[in-house]
Amino acid sequence: MMYSKILGTGSFLPEKILTNFDLEKMVDTTNEWIIERTGIKQRHIAGTHENAATMADTAGRNALAAAGLEPADIGMIIVTSTTPQLVFPSTACLLQARYGISGCPAFDLNASACAGFMYGLSIADQYIRNGTIKNALVIGSEVMSRIVDWNDRSTCVLFGDGAGAVLLGASEEPGILSTHLHADGNYKDVLYLPLATSQSPTFETVKMMGNQLFKLAVNILGDLFDETLAANQLEKSAIDWLIPHQANIRIIEAMAKKLNLPLDRVALTLANQGNTSSASIPLALDLAVRAGQIKRGQLLLMEGFGGGLAWGSALVRY
Ligand code: COA
Protein backbone atom coordinates (compact mmCIF):
# COMPACT_ATOMS: atom_id res chain seq x y z
CA MET A 1 0.00 0.00 0.00
CA MET A 2 1.46 3.36 -1.04
CA TYR A 3 0.70 6.61 0.76
CA SER A 4 1.72 10.20 0.28
CA LYS A 5 3.35 11.64 3.37
CA ILE A 6 4.17 15.19 4.39
CA LEU A 7 7.98 15.22 4.16
CA GLY A 8 8.42 18.94 4.81
CA THR A 9 6.55 22.21 5.30
CA GLY A 10 7.48 25.84 4.67
CA SER A 11 5.97 29.30 4.71
CA PHE A 12 6.55 32.95 4.02
CA LEU A 13 5.03 36.12 5.46
CA PRO A 14 5.72 39.64 4.13
CA GLU A 15 7.49 41.95 6.56
CA LYS A 16 4.92 44.74 6.53
CA ILE A 17 2.22 44.46 9.19
CA LEU A 18 -1.15 46.23 9.21
CA THR A 19 -2.74 46.33 12.67
CA ASN A 20 -6.35 46.88 13.64
CA PHE A 21 -5.27 50.31 14.91
CA ASP A 22 -3.97 51.13 11.42
CA LEU A 23 -7.36 50.09 10.02
CA GLU A 24 -9.14 52.39 12.49
CA LYS A 25 -7.55 55.25 10.57
CA MET A 26 -8.68 53.88 7.19
CA VAL A 27 -12.32 52.80 7.71
CA ASP A 28 -15.10 53.20 10.30
CA THR A 29 -14.07 50.33 12.59
CA THR A 30 -12.47 49.64 15.95
CA ASN A 31 -9.81 47.27 17.23
CA GLU A 32 -12.38 45.88 19.70
CA TRP A 33 -14.99 45.15 17.01
CA ILE A 34 -12.49 43.32 14.80
CA ILE A 35 -11.11 41.21 17.67
CA GLU A 36 -14.53 40.39 19.09
CA ARG A 37 -16.21 39.50 15.77
CA THR A 38 -13.24 37.86 13.99
CA GLY A 39 -10.30 37.16 16.36
CA ILE A 40 -7.92 39.10 14.10
CA LYS A 41 -5.39 41.58 15.51
CA GLN A 42 -3.07 42.18 12.56
CA ARG A 43 -2.26 40.91 9.05
CA HIS A 44 0.84 40.89 6.82
CA ILE A 45 0.76 42.94 3.60
CA ALA A 46 2.95 42.23 0.57
CA GLY A 47 5.29 45.00 -0.56
CA THR A 48 5.38 46.20 -4.16
CA HIS A 49 8.39 43.91 -4.79
CA GLU A 50 6.42 40.85 -3.62
CA ASN A 51 3.78 38.74 -5.39
CA ALA A 52 2.33 35.21 -5.36
CA ALA A 53 5.41 33.80 -7.13
CA THR A 54 8.04 35.40 -4.89
CA MET A 55 6.18 34.33 -1.75
CA ALA A 56 5.59 30.80 -3.09
CA ASP A 57 9.28 30.61 -3.99
CA THR A 58 10.44 31.07 -0.39
CA ALA A 59 7.70 28.90 1.12
CA GLY A 60 8.52 26.12 -1.36
CA ARG A 61 12.27 26.29 -0.73
CA ASN A 62 11.64 26.07 3.01
CA ALA A 63 9.49 22.96 2.51
CA LEU A 64 12.14 21.38 0.28
CA ALA A 65 14.85 22.10 2.86
CA ALA A 66 12.71 20.65 5.66
CA ALA A 67 12.26 17.48 3.57
CA GLY A 68 15.98 17.33 2.73
CA LEU A 69 15.17 17.45 -1.01
CA GLU A 70 16.32 19.49 -4.01
CA PRO A 71 14.20 21.18 -6.69
CA ALA A 72 15.27 18.41 -9.09
CA ASP A 73 13.35 15.92 -6.88
CA ILE A 74 10.01 17.65 -7.50
CA GLY A 75 7.63 15.58 -9.65
CA MET A 76 4.73 18.05 -9.74
CA ILE A 77 4.08 21.64 -8.67
CA ILE A 78 0.60 22.81 -7.74
CA VAL A 79 0.06 26.42 -6.68
CA THR A 80 -3.37 27.18 -5.27
CA SER A 81 -3.65 30.90 -5.81
CA THR A 82 -6.50 33.15 -6.83
CA THR A 83 -4.19 36.16 -6.77
CA PRO A 84 -1.46 35.13 -9.25
CA GLN A 85 1.20 37.46 -10.59
CA LEU A 86 0.03 36.74 -14.17
CA VAL A 87 -3.11 35.05 -15.48
CA PHE A 88 -0.69 32.87 -17.44
CA PRO A 89 1.89 31.44 -17.34
CA SER A 90 0.77 29.90 -14.05
CA THR A 91 2.56 30.79 -10.83
CA ALA A 92 3.60 27.12 -10.73
CA CYS A 93 5.41 27.53 -14.09
CA LEU A 94 7.05 30.74 -12.89
CA LEU A 95 8.22 28.81 -9.86
CA GLN A 96 9.65 26.03 -12.00
CA ALA A 97 11.85 28.58 -13.79
CA ARG A 98 12.85 30.16 -10.48
CA TYR A 99 13.93 26.73 -9.21
CA GLY A 100 15.90 26.03 -12.40
CA ILE A 101 13.94 22.90 -13.26
CA SER A 102 11.73 21.91 -16.19
CA GLY A 103 9.64 19.02 -17.45
CA CYS A 104 7.48 18.10 -14.46
CA PRO A 105 3.78 19.07 -14.59
CA ALA A 106 3.19 22.49 -13.02
CA PHE A 107 -0.16 24.24 -12.75
CA ASP A 108 -2.24 26.65 -10.71
CA LEU A 109 -5.47 25.48 -9.19
CA ASN A 110 -8.38 27.76 -8.46
CA ALA A 111 -10.89 26.02 -6.23
CA SER A 112 -12.68 29.29 -5.54
CA ALA A 113 -9.96 30.73 -3.30
CA CYS A 114 -9.89 29.53 0.29
CA ALA A 115 -10.65 25.82 -0.32
CA GLY A 116 -7.83 25.64 -2.89
CA PHE A 117 -5.21 24.04 -0.69
CA MET A 118 -7.43 21.08 0.21
CA TYR A 119 -8.09 20.50 -3.51
CA GLY A 120 -4.36 20.77 -4.33
CA LEU A 121 -3.38 18.37 -1.58
CA SER A 122 -5.99 15.86 -2.71
CA ILE A 123 -4.84 15.94 -6.34
CA ALA A 124 -1.17 15.55 -5.44
CA ASP A 125 -2.10 12.68 -3.13
CA GLN A 126 -3.86 10.80 -5.98
CA TYR A 127 -0.82 11.11 -8.30
CA ILE A 128 1.58 9.91 -5.61
CA ARG A 129 -0.57 7.00 -4.44
CA ASN A 130 -1.11 5.69 -7.97
CA GLY A 131 2.66 5.74 -8.51
CA THR A 132 2.74 8.36 -11.29
CA ILE A 133 5.03 10.69 -9.34
CA LYS A 134 7.22 10.41 -6.25
CA ASN A 135 7.18 13.94 -4.83
CA ALA A 136 4.85 16.92 -5.18
CA LEU A 137 5.13 20.50 -4.01
CA VAL A 138 1.74 22.01 -3.10
CA ILE A 139 1.75 25.71 -2.27
CA GLY A 140 -0.93 28.20 -1.31
CA SER A 141 0.25 31.73 -2.03
CA GLU A 142 -2.08 34.71 -1.86
CA VAL A 143 -1.85 38.49 -2.11
CA MET A 144 -5.35 39.18 -0.82
CA SER A 145 -4.43 42.82 -0.12
CA ARG A 146 -4.57 43.44 -3.89
CA ILE A 147 -8.16 42.24 -4.31
CA VAL A 148 -9.90 43.72 -1.27
CA ASP A 149 -11.71 47.04 -1.28
CA TRP A 150 -9.80 49.09 1.31
CA ASN A 151 -12.90 51.28 1.73
CA ASP A 152 -15.19 48.36 2.65
CA ARG A 153 -14.93 47.73 6.40
CA SER A 154 -16.92 44.49 6.18
CA THR A 155 -14.20 42.76 4.12
CA CYS A 156 -10.91 44.68 4.33
CA VAL A 157 -10.37 43.89 8.02
CA LEU A 158 -10.46 40.14 7.33
CA PHE A 159 -7.69 39.34 4.87
CA GLY A 160 -3.89 39.17 4.77
CA ASP A 161 -1.03 38.00 2.53
CA GLY A 162 1.30 35.02 2.81
CA ALA A 163 2.30 31.60 1.48
CA GLY A 164 2.45 28.09 2.87
CA ALA A 165 3.90 24.96 1.28
CA VAL A 166 3.87 21.21 1.76
CA LEU A 167 6.27 18.76 0.17
CA LEU A 168 4.50 15.43 -0.26
CA GLY A 169 6.42 12.25 -0.97
CA ALA A 170 5.64 8.58 -1.59
CA SER A 171 5.84 6.44 1.54
CA GLU A 172 4.95 2.95 2.69
CA GLU A 173 4.05 4.41 6.08
CA PRO A 174 0.62 6.03 6.45
CA GLY A 175 0.53 9.74 5.61
CA ILE A 176 -2.61 11.20 4.02
CA LEU A 177 -5.34 8.75 5.05
CA SER A 178 -8.19 10.32 3.09
CA THR A 179 -9.28 13.54 1.42
CA HIS A 180 -12.85 14.74 0.91
CA LEU A 181 -13.78 17.46 -1.56
CA HIS A 182 -17.13 19.15 -2.17
CA ALA A 183 -18.64 22.13 -3.96
CA ASP A 184 -22.06 23.74 -4.42
CA GLY A 185 -22.21 26.38 -7.12
CA ASN A 186 -25.66 27.52 -6.00
CA TYR A 187 -23.98 29.77 -3.44
CA LYS A 188 -22.12 31.86 -6.01
CA ASP A 189 -23.30 35.20 -4.62
CA VAL A 190 -22.13 34.56 -1.06
CA LEU A 191 -18.47 35.21 -1.91
CA TYR A 192 -17.10 36.20 -5.31
CA LEU A 193 -14.55 38.26 -7.19
CA PRO A 194 -15.61 39.67 -10.60
CA LEU A 195 -13.11 39.70 -13.43
CA ALA A 196 -11.56 42.98 -14.43
CA THR A 197 -12.97 44.20 -17.78
CA SER A 198 -11.87 46.64 -20.43
CA GLN A 199 -14.24 49.17 -18.76
CA SER A 200 -12.66 48.49 -15.38
CA PRO A 201 -9.15 47.26 -16.16
CA THR A 202 -7.82 47.24 -12.62
CA PHE A 203 -8.57 44.48 -10.15
CA GLU A 204 -12.16 44.13 -9.07
CA THR A 205 -12.62 43.53 -5.35
CA VAL A 206 -14.01 40.73 -3.18
CA LYS A 207 -17.78 40.78 -2.56
CA MET A 208 -19.05 38.85 0.45
CA MET A 209 -22.28 38.12 2.35
CA GLY A 210 -20.44 37.52 5.64
CA ASN A 211 -23.31 36.49 7.84
CA GLN A 212 -24.74 33.90 5.41
CA LEU A 213 -21.26 32.53 4.76
CA PHE A 214 -20.62 32.18 8.48
CA LYS A 215 -23.72 30.01 8.97
CA LEU A 216 -23.03 27.93 5.86
CA ALA A 217 -19.45 27.32 6.97
CA VAL A 218 -20.45 26.02 10.40
CA ASN A 219 -22.95 23.59 8.84
CA ILE A 220 -20.83 22.24 5.99
CA LEU A 221 -17.73 21.84 8.16
CA GLY A 222 -19.65 19.93 10.82
CA ASP A 223 -20.90 17.47 8.17
CA LEU A 224 -17.42 17.29 6.66
CA PHE A 225 -15.90 16.21 9.99
CA ASP A 226 -18.52 13.47 10.35
CA GLU A 227 -17.82 12.27 6.79
CA THR A 228 -14.03 12.28 7.28
CA LEU A 229 -14.13 10.38 10.57
CA ALA A 230 -16.68 7.86 9.27
CA ALA A 231 -14.59 7.15 6.16
CA ASN A 232 -11.68 6.21 8.43
CA GLN A 233 -13.82 4.46 11.06
CA LEU A 234 -12.43 6.76 13.72
CA GLU A 235 -13.95 8.58 16.69
CA LYS A 236 -13.27 12.29 17.16
CA SER A 237 -11.13 11.46 20.20
CA ALA A 238 -8.50 10.09 17.75
CA ILE A 239 -7.75 13.57 16.39
CA ASP A 240 -4.61 15.22 17.84
CA TRP A 241 -4.76 18.51 15.92
CA LEU A 242 -7.27 20.54 13.94
CA ILE A 243 -5.63 22.59 11.17
CA PRO A 244 -8.50 24.83 10.06
CA HIS A 245 -8.83 27.45 7.38
CA GLN A 246 -8.35 30.71 9.28
CA ALA A 247 -11.43 32.81 8.49
CA ASN A 248 -13.07 33.65 11.82
CA ILE A 249 -12.22 32.60 15.39
CA ARG A 250 -15.90 31.98 16.14
CA ILE A 251 -16.14 29.44 13.29
CA ILE A 252 -12.91 27.78 14.47
CA GLU A 253 -14.12 27.63 18.08
CA ALA A 254 -17.39 26.02 16.97
CA MET A 255 -15.42 23.42 15.00
CA ALA A 256 -13.05 22.68 17.91
CA LYS A 257 -16.08 22.23 20.15
CA LYS A 258 -17.62 19.81 17.66
CA LEU A 259 -14.43 17.72 17.92
CA ASN A 260 -14.16 18.14 21.73
CA LEU A 261 -10.71 19.59 21.14
CA PRO A 262 -9.30 22.35 23.39
CA LEU A 263 -8.07 25.42 21.47
CA ASP A 264 -4.46 24.53 22.29
CA ARG A 265 -4.93 21.55 19.95
CA VAL A 266 -5.92 23.87 17.09
CA ALA A 267 -3.24 25.40 14.84
CA LEU A 268 -4.11 29.10 15.11
CA THR A 269 -2.58 31.91 13.08
CA LEU A 270 -5.69 34.03 12.61
CA ALA A 271 -4.85 36.69 15.22
CA ASN A 272 -1.52 37.56 13.61
CA GLN A 273 -2.20 36.83 9.96
CA GLY A 274 -5.93 37.26 9.26
CA ASN A 275 -7.40 35.16 6.47
CA THR A 276 -4.70 34.36 3.89
CA SER A 277 -7.16 32.36 1.78
CA SER A 278 -5.64 29.19 0.28
CA ALA A 279 -2.35 29.85 2.11
CA SER A 280 -3.88 29.73 5.58
CA ILE A 281 -3.91 25.94 6.15
CA PRO A 282 -0.28 25.21 5.12
CA LEU A 283 0.85 28.38 6.93
CA ALA A 284 -0.80 27.26 10.16
CA LEU A 285 0.61 23.76 9.72
CA ASP A 286 4.15 24.99 9.10
CA LEU A 287 4.19 27.35 12.08
CA ALA A 288 2.87 24.65 14.43
CA VAL A 289 5.41 22.12 13.09
CA ARG A 290 8.29 24.58 13.45
CA ALA A 291 7.16 25.53 16.97
CA GLY A 292 7.48 21.83 17.87
CA GLN A 293 3.77 21.59 18.66
CA ILE A 294 2.79 19.14 15.92
CA LYS A 295 4.87 15.97 16.16
CA ARG A 296 5.51 12.99 13.89
CA GLY A 297 2.90 10.27 14.29
CA GLN A 298 0.09 12.63 15.34
CA LEU A 299 -3.27 12.63 13.58
CA LEU A 300 -4.21 15.91 11.87
CA LEU A 301 -7.60 16.98 10.55
CA MET A 302 -7.32 19.77 7.98
CA GLU A 303 -10.34 21.64 6.64
CA GLY A 304 -10.91 24.49 4.24
CA PHE A 305 -13.91 26.32 2.74
CA GLY A 306 -14.43 29.31 0.55
CA GLY A 307 -16.19 30.85 -2.44
CA GLY A 308 -18.03 28.55 -4.77
CA LEU A 309 -18.96 27.31 -2.27
CA ALA A 310 -16.12 24.82 -2.26
CA TRP A 311 -14.88 22.91 0.76
CA GLY A 312 -12.70 19.97 1.66
CA SER A 313 -10.82 18.07 4.34
CA ALA A 314 -7.84 15.76 4.75
CA LEU A 315 -7.07 13.32 7.52
CA VAL A 316 -3.30 13.04 7.83
CA ARG A 317 -0.93 10.94 9.90
CA TYR A 318 1.94 13.44 10.22
N1 COA B 1 -16.19 47.38 12.00
C1 COA B 1 -17.32 47.76 12.63
N2 COA B 1 -18.54 47.36 12.26
C2 COA B 1 -18.62 46.53 11.22
C3 COA B 1 -17.50 46.08 10.51
C4 COA B 1 -16.24 46.54 10.95
N3 COA B 1 -15.10 46.17 10.35
N4 COA B 1 -17.90 45.25 9.53
C5 COA B 1 -19.24 45.17 9.61
N5 COA B 1 -19.68 45.96 10.62
C6 COA B 1 -21.05 46.18 11.06
C7 COA B 1 -22.07 45.92 9.97
O1 COA B 1 -22.20 47.03 9.13
C8 COA B 1 -23.31 45.64 10.77
O2 COA B 1 -23.85 46.88 11.17
P1 COA B 1 -25.43 47.08 11.23
O3 COA B 1 -25.92 46.10 12.24
O4 COA B 1 -25.56 48.50 11.63
O5 COA B 1 -25.92 46.79 9.85
C9 COA B 1 -22.79 44.95 12.04
O6 COA B 1 -21.38 45.24 12.08
C10 COA B 1 -22.98 43.44 12.04
O7 COA B 1 -22.62 42.95 10.78
P2 COA B 1 -22.62 41.43 10.46
O8 COA B 1 -22.15 41.21 9.06
O9 COA B 1 -23.93 40.82 10.85
O10 COA B 1 -21.51 40.94 11.51
P3 COA B 1 -21.03 39.49 11.83
O11 COA B 1 -21.10 39.24 13.27
O12 COA B 1 -21.63 38.46 10.91
O13 COA B 1 -19.47 39.58 11.47
C11 COA B 1 -18.01 38.88 9.70
C12 COA B 1 -19.08 39.89 10.16
C13 COA B 1 -17.66 39.19 8.27
C14 COA B 1 -16.81 39.06 10.61
C15 COA B 1 -18.57 37.45 9.84
O14 COA B 1 -19.85 37.38 9.27
C16 COA B 1 -17.69 36.42 9.19
O15 COA B 1 -16.55 36.24 9.54
N6 COA B 1 -18.28 35.67 8.24
C17 COA B 1 -17.57 34.62 7.56
C18 COA B 1 -16.65 35.25 6.56
C19 COA B 1 -15.71 34.26 5.97
O16 COA B 1 -15.57 33.18 6.44
N7 COA B 1 -15.06 34.73 4.94
C20 COA B 1 -14.02 34.03 4.29
C21 COA B 1 -14.46 32.82 3.64
S1 COA B 1 -13.13 32.03 2.92
Image (cartoon, helix red, strand yellow):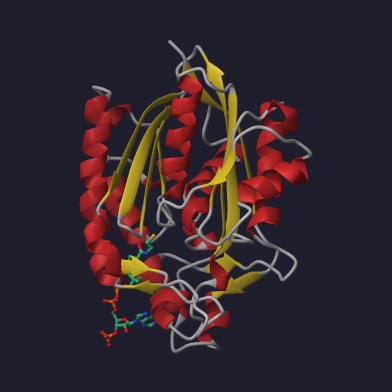
Rendering coords of residue 292 (x, y %): 59, 35
Count up the numbered dots. 0
* Residue 145 sits above or below residue 265 on the image: below
Residue 318: tell me if it is visible.
no
Splitting the image into 4 quarters, where does residue 209 fall?
A: bottom left
Residue reaching furthest to the right: 100
The N terminus sits in image quarter: top left
Splitting the image into 4 quarters, where does residue 114 fall?
A: bottom left
**Residue name at image x 24 percent, y 62 percent:** 187
* Residue 273 sits above or below residue 208 on the image: above
In the image, is 223 to the left or to the right of 300? left
In the image, is 22 to the left or to the right of 197? right
Picture quarter with ligand 1: bottom left
Using the image as rendered, state which of residue 166 and residue 271 is in the foreground. Answer: 166
In the image, is 3 to the left or to the right of 182? right
Rendering coords of residue 227 (x, y %): 22, 35
Rendering coords of residue 173 (x, y %): 49, 14
Rendering coords of residue 95 (x, y %): 69, 46
Residue 131: tell me if it is visible.
yes
* Residue 152 sits above or below residue 274 on the image: below
**Residue name at image x 20 percent, y 43 percent:** 223
**Residue name at image x 79 percent, y 39 percent:** 100
In the image, is 134 to the left or to the right of 101? left
Splitting the image into 4 quarters, where does residue 308 fall?
A: bottom left
Using the image as rendered, state which of residue 181 and residue 265 is in the foreground. Answer: 181
Using the image as rendered, state which of residue 6 and residue 103 is in the foreground. Answer: 103
